Image (cartoon, rainbow, N blue to C red):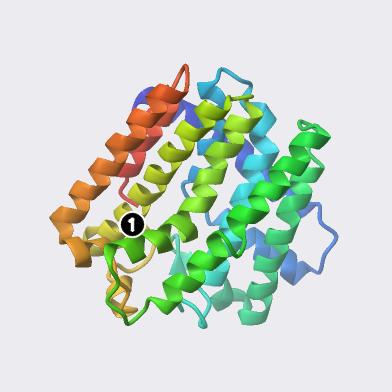
Amino acid sequence: MTSSFETFMSEHKPEIEDRLLNEVDELKVPSPLQEAMRYSLEAGGKRLRPLLLLATLDSFNKDVRKGYDVAAAIEMIHTYSLIHDDLPAMDDDHYRRGKLTNHKVYGEAVAILAGDALLTHSFKMVTQSNHLNDQERVWLVDHLSTAAGPEGMVGGQLADMEGENKQLTVDQLEYIHTHKTGELLAFSIEAGAYLAGATFEQRSLLERYAKNIGLAFQIKDDILDVEGNADLLGKPVGSDDENEKSTYPKLLTLEGAKEKMVSHIEEAKSYCQKAVPSPSFLLQLADYIMERKY
């Protein structure tokens, strides 16, 4: 990461995290539910999706504060998906970001409800944002529900589960990750472009940027599950093997997976440079995805 991107992250990441925690703290709900919601939000993470939205706004020379509430809503949805992914009925993970998973601390029932609460409340954050007009609120809720719902992330999660214990093709694996991971990443960029007033052509180019970024991100995850550092990852490596999942290193070899990741990053950068007037942070985010250690 370059120093300019580090500065961008250090300036905007705390704003997103403050919004997330303040929003939960103000809810009038039973304390176990509030604590469980806060627990997973406080676990940290890269906040990649909010940063993608803000970086897109910045690339069009727009005030990134317009996107703060939407960025926080996206992170709420991402956090809910992680809580549910970790449940015994799904991946049955014990650790997330170096901490016990939500259900290991609060029990399965509360963890499920905490995830439900984060998902549903995220839409309220969008509809009540003072930085948006009514047309923007409707557009964002419509597109966010598609990205997070059965045609997007949830459908991808099911395809991922059904793919366990099977030898998938690269195309099948790409379908899973385009939906499970890529749709919410793509929405983050699409929302930033929409709020920035981008043209149809610019948004189309950024959609291709987003698709390649999403696939590169997942390939990197697969690579880190093979050769990553468990302390940095906050969870044991090799869980994909234990769950008998098809991965890019399995299908393409480790070196082949790295080559495919670089190819997606380069393609993403090419679309980005054609789409926006000041792509600096979006280009640096692409490099960050490729170089990240966790």
The quarter of the displayed image where residue 15 is located:
top right
The residue drawn where x is 53% and y is 38% is 189
Frontmost residue, 288 versus 40: 288
The residue drawn where x is 73% and y is 71% is 32
The residue drawn where x is 33% and y is 29% is 270
Relative side of 30 to 53, left or right: right
Report the number of discs: 1
The residue drawn where x is 62% and y is 26% is 64
> Where is residue 271 shown, x and y percent of the image?
38, 30
Q: Amino acid at mark 1?
A: Asp
> Where is residue 239 shown, x and y percent of the image?
32, 72
Considering only vertical position in the picture, is 69 above or below 283? below
Residue 138 in view of the camera:
yes
Tag 1 secondary structure: helix
> Where is residue 172 shown, x and y percent of the image?
35, 66
Frontmost residue, 230 versus 123: 123
The quarter of the displayed image where residue 218 is located:
bottom left
Relative side of 54 to 120, left or right: left
The residue tagged 1 is: 221
Frontmost residue, 78 versus 209: 209
- For the N terminus, give its image quadrant: top left
- Point out the residue furthest to the right here: 28
Considering only vertical position in the picture, is 166 above or below 54? below
Mark 1 Cα-neighbour bin, 10 Å: few <14, some 14–19, many ≥20: many
